[in-house]
């Protein structure tokens, strides 16, 4: 028993040290509210001149607004710092709750290890904590999860993530809800989609393949495409298992042309159940019904 406690203690110490290393690496790029100011500027540009990308021409490439119009549209409602940061903290707490609910004390280990990535985006006011809060709902709720995934897609993700997830699970109802929500959100953003396409087509700093980041593209475009393809195949094949949602998040990370350390926090949106529950992800895989009680909402 004593030796087991020693092993557990050493492992937890290593997890914490890894987390401290992540904080150390991310600290130089942590500026409270920096990303929120980018979103606020895009929201102001959208309201004043009808183009959320107007200020990108004079902005440093690290502070360009590169999202679909939806986030800029939300800024007049959510962009006041107390409201925005409350939303980000609440989303982070939701993610932590799911880890605790499904993994118990084991859930603290991934949270410690990834404290640098999630801490940085939380302080910077980046939308990623909200993204994580939306993604963590997907494997537990059918309709709410599909809508959450669609909103997350319109904030920062590639739509192929949702397609692979639902196709792999053969969940046609979930796929229909996801597709319907995507269409509805595109209609809502329609007045500014032309500006979105124009920015990505003509701005010299807009290309998503311009900067390699820390991902597979460091080994070259061929390695990146092959690696992303293999991850997609694995995500499709494992979608109905307990590791399905985690593999889909891994696929999303592998497919990013510019993977940043902060993106690793998305892994927290896929808690792995380690204690017995009445209905688990495995049961949901065999019978594509929402896991949580009352999740037909």
Image (spheres, helix red, strand yellow):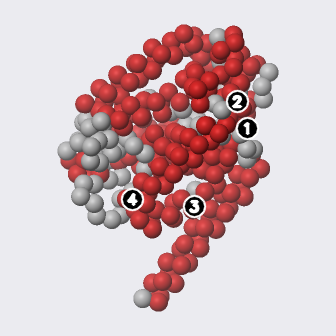
Along the polypeptide, which appears first: circle 4 or circle 3?
Answer: 4
Percent from the top left, x then y, of residue 56? Answer: 73, 21
- Residue receiving disc 1: 34
Q: Residue 215 appears in which quarter of the rendering?
A: top right
Marks 1,2: beta carbons within 8 A: yes
Q: Quick check: can you spot residue 125?
A: yes
Q: The residue tagged with tag 3: helix, strand or loop?
A: helix
Q: Determine the residue positioned at 67% across, 46% down.
A: 123
How many circles with numbers are drawn on the protein? 4
Task: Estimate the spatial distance between the alpha carbons at disc 1 and disc 2, rounded to whole Å.
Answer: 7 Å
**Mark 4 nearby-residue class (10 Å; few <14, some 14–19, many ≥20):** some
**Residue topped by disc 2:** 38
- As measured in the structure, the alpha-carbon distance from the residue carrying label 2 to the one carrying label 3 is 28 Å
Residue 12 screen position, x and y as percent: 55, 72
> Given the current orientation, which residue lies at the most extreme bottom position?
2
Q: Gap in Å between the C-alphas at discs 3 and 1?
A: 24 Å
Residue 134's x, y, as percent?
45, 39
| Towards the viewer: 263 or 46 | 46
Q: Residue at x 72, y 58 (%)?
A: 24
Q: Position of residue 84 (x, y in %)?
A: 61, 37
Q: Is residue 233 left or right of residue 240?
A: right
Q: Secondary structure at mark 4?
A: helix
Q: Which mark is residue 113?
A: 3
Q: Identify the residue under disc 4.
A: 101
Disc 1 from disc 4: Cα separation: 33 Å
Nearest to viewer (mark 4 / mark 3): 4
């Amino acid at each position: 028993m004593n030796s087991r406690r020693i092993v557990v203690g050493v492992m937890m110490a290593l997890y914490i040290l890894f987390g401290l290393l992540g904080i150390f690496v991310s600290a130089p790029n942590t500026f409270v509210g920096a990303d929120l100011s980018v979103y606020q500027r895009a929201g102001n540009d959208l309201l004043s001149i009808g183009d959320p990308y107007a200020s990108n021409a004079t902005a440093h490439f690290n502070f360009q607004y590169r999202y679909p119009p939806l986030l800029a549209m939300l800024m007049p409602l959510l962009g006041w710092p107390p409201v925005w940061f409350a939303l980000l903290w609440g989303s982070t707490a939701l993610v932590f709750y799911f880890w605790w609910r499904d993994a118990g004390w084991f859930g603290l280990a991934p949270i410690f290890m990834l404290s640098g990535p999630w801490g940085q985006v939380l302080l910077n006011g980046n939308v990623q904590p909200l993204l994580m809060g939306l993604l963590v709902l997907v494997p537990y709720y059918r309709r709410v999860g599909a809508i959450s995934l669609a909103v997350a897609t319109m904030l920062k993700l590639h739509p192929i993530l949702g397609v692979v997830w639902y196709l792999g699970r053969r969940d046609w109802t979930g796929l229909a809800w996801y597709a319907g929500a995507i269409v509805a959100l595109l209609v809502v953003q329609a007045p500014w989609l032309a500006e979105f396409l124009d920015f990505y087509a003509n701005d010299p700093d807009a290309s998503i393949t311009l900067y390699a980041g820390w991902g597979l593209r460091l080994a070259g475009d061929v390695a990146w495409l092959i690696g992303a393809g293999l991850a997609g195949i694995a995500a499709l094949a494992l979608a109905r298992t307990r590791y399905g949602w985690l593999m889909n998040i891994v696929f999303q990370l592998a497919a990013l042309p510019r993977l940043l350390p902060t993106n690793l926090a998305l892994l927290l949106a896929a808690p792995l159940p380690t204690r017995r529950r009445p209905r688990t992800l495995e049961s949901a895989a065999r019978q594509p019904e929402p896991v949580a009680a009352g999740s037909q909402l």
